Amino acid sequence: GYLSISASEDSALQMKLSNNSGLTYDGLNADSGTWINYVTSKQWDFGAGDTTTVYYQFRDAYNNYTATGSVSTPEKPLHLTVYDVSNPSLSQWKIFMSWKVVADPAAGFKRYMVYRSTDQQNWTLMTPSGITNRLINYYYDKSGLNNTTRYYYRVRAEDNLNNISKYSAT
């Protein structure tokens, strides 16, 4: 995955990142726990688990340090269940899916995003505006389906700071 990082300073800035709260080497990222030059985007291995927390600290050219901060993604939607609710006699092809409601993120819930694929490689966002009520944990797909294609679905959650969860299982 990628981290998007935003900080401002009028001198050279460095940062320390880790999946560990003590800002030590996390075993997943080669430069975790060490001071590196500030960048706005960083490839990062978030590890396993349903939520992801990354810890950070900044220092300027004068060795002024920020307190350690952290940012967490929303919980990933769990227990995705997909049902074929088609009516073949009328050639009406429909899918209903539901998942466990995610915990309310600290930053507040923004939306669920539902994706569909026919090959598990190329995914289409089925809910461009998202499902904005955290307690609405279902989606009904009736757009462009047919009875000869296998469909795959997955769901993500996003919080009000635009942090995005890991994908649900497909």
Image: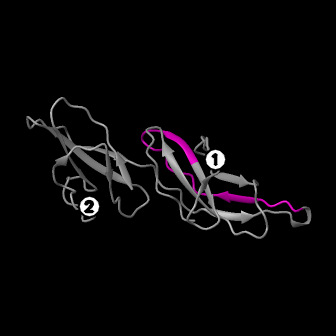
Q: Which residue corresponds to the image point at 15% horizontal and 50% vertical from the top-left?
A: 35
Question: Is the residue 64 above or below the residue 140 in the image?
Answer: above
What residue does disc 1 label?
127
Q: How many marks?
A: 2
Q: In which quarter of the image is the N terminus?
A: bottom left
* Labelled disc at residue 29: 2
Q: Residue furthest top?
A: 10
Residues in magenta?
91-112
Answer with the quarter of the image where residue 29 lies: bottom left
x 67%, y 65%: residue: 151
**Dot 2 surroundings within 10 Å: few (below 14), some, or many (20 or more)?**
some
Q: What element carries label 1?
A: loop
**Drawn side of residue 110 relative to residue 69, left or right:** right
In the shown orientation, is residue 22 left or right of residue 76?
Answer: left
- As shown in the figure, which amino acid type bears the numbered disc 2? Asn
Instruction: Check the image and tell me how it is coloured.
Output: one colour
Q: Mark 1 Cα within 10 Å, few/some/many (few <14, many 20+)? A: some
User: What residue sits 18% from the left and 37% below the top?
Assistant: 66
Residue 38 shown left or right of residue 54 in the figure? left
Callout 1 amino acid: Thr
